[in-house]
Image (cartoon, helix red, strand yellow):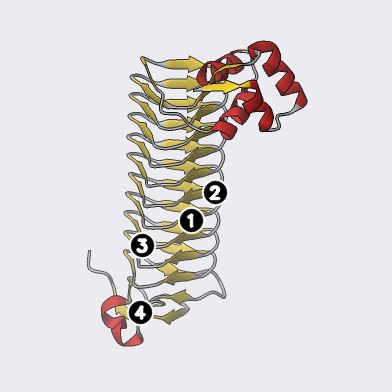
């Protein structure tokens, strides 16, 4: 893909950036070669701007490993080993790595991110498709996934977590802000969220579920341990806990919000060793059978 001087000028670049572009490339040149040269010259912000303006390409680059100050690539990257980037990691389409991925800056992937190891980012992560990491994901900033998310180990997020599809976490899910999952959310161990936790479908955890504010699910909520929130607990269908169900002081526990009252005994059961204080709706069924 070739970009001309007039194409770039039509996007209204900043004066300094366009002057540098003209000095370096004259009347234009190959799109990806321009991105590579901008990054090599330390103009990573200009490279990201160019990618935002002209979008991804179908170019495929296959390499053994990546160790760089920054990466801005418009197509798909396939890396046989690991990726270690001190700054920004920006890929227009997909990134597949046979090892781990570490970035000292923002990670932004246009389509899928598939990693045989773990993902560590010192800033935010935005994946435009599915995110799959065979190990864990540790993100200092916001983590946003526009598809399904799956990790083999822990998922730790230092800010908000937003998933447009389903989320499956092999062990613990820990988030320092709120979590919003458009479909189902499942964790093999504990789910601990500092703010509100919302899922459009069900929430399940092998351990306990703790929400720093409200806990809401369009379907049911199930935990091997405690289901607890500092605010209200709301489920469209059933609530099942191996230990206890606890809402915050002055808040209620609601089950069966999306079920007719006549069907509560079958589809809006509330099961725990003790009846929850503040149970406002649903069918109290006593201790769950595990």
| Quarter residue 11 falls in | top right
Q: Which residue is mark 4?
A: 259
Instruction: For the residues labelled 2 and 1, say whether their Cβ atoms are less than 8 Å apart.
Output: yes
> Dot 1, crowdedness within 10 Å: few (<14), some or many (≥20)?
some
As drawn, 132 above or below 58: below
Marks 2 and 1, Cα distance to the nearest angstrom?
Answer: 8 Å
Q: Position of residue 257 (x, y in %)?
A: 41, 77
**Which comes before the other along the chain, label 3 or label 4?**
3
**Residue 86 in view of the camera:** no
| Quarter residue 149 falls in | top left
Instruction: For the residues labelled 1 and 3, say whether their Cβ atoms are less than 8 Å apart.
Output: no
Residue 202 numbered mark, or none: 3
**Residue 262 in view of the camera:** yes
Marks 4 and 2, Cα distance to the nearest angstrom?
Answer: 30 Å
Q: Position of residue 226 (x, y in %)?
A: 39, 61
Marks 3 and 4, Cα distance to the nearest angstrom?
Answer: 14 Å
Report the side of 257 relative to 44 (left or right). Answer: left
**Which comes before the other along the chain, label 4 or label 1?**
1
Say which residue appears at 68% left-offset and 27% top-offset.
9
Say which residue appears at 60% left-offset and 28% top-offset.
50
């Amino acid at each position: 893909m070739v970009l001309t001087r007039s194409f770039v000028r039509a996007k209204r670049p900043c004066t300094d950036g366009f002057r540098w572009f003209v000095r370096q490339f004259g009347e234009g040149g190959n799109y990806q070669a321009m991105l590579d040269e901008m990054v090599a010259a330390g103009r990573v912000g200009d490279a990201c701007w160019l990618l935002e303006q002209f979008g991804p390409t179908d170019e495929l680059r296959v390499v053994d490993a990546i160790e760089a100050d920054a990466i801005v690539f418009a197509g798909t990257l396939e890396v046989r080993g690991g990726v270690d980037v001190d700054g920004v990691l920006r890929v227009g389409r997909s990134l597949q790595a046979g090892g781990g991925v570490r970035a000292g800056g923002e990670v932004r992937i246009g389509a899928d991110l598939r990693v045989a190891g773990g993902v560590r980012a010192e800033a935010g992560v935005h994946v435009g498709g599915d995110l799959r990491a065979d190990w864990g994901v540790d993100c200092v900033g916001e983590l946003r996934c526009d598809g399904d998310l799956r990790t083999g180990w822990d998922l730790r997020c230092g800010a908000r977590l937003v998933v447009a599809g389903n989320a499956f976490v092999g062990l613990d899910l820990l988030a320092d802000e709120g979590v919003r999952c458009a479909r189902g959310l499942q964790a093999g161990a504990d789910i601990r969220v500092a703010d509100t936790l919302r899922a459009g479908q069900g929430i399940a955890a092998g351990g306990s579920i703790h929400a720093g504010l409200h806990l809401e699910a369009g379907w049911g909520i199930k935990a091997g341990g405690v289901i607890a929130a500092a605010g209200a607990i709301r489920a469209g269908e059933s609530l099942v806990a191996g230990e206890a169900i606890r809402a915050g002081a002055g808040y209620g526990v609601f089950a069966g919000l999306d079920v007719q009252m006549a069907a509560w005994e079958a589809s809006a059961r509330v099961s725990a060793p003790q009846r929850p204080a503040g149970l406002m709706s649903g069918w109290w069924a006593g201790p769950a059978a595990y």
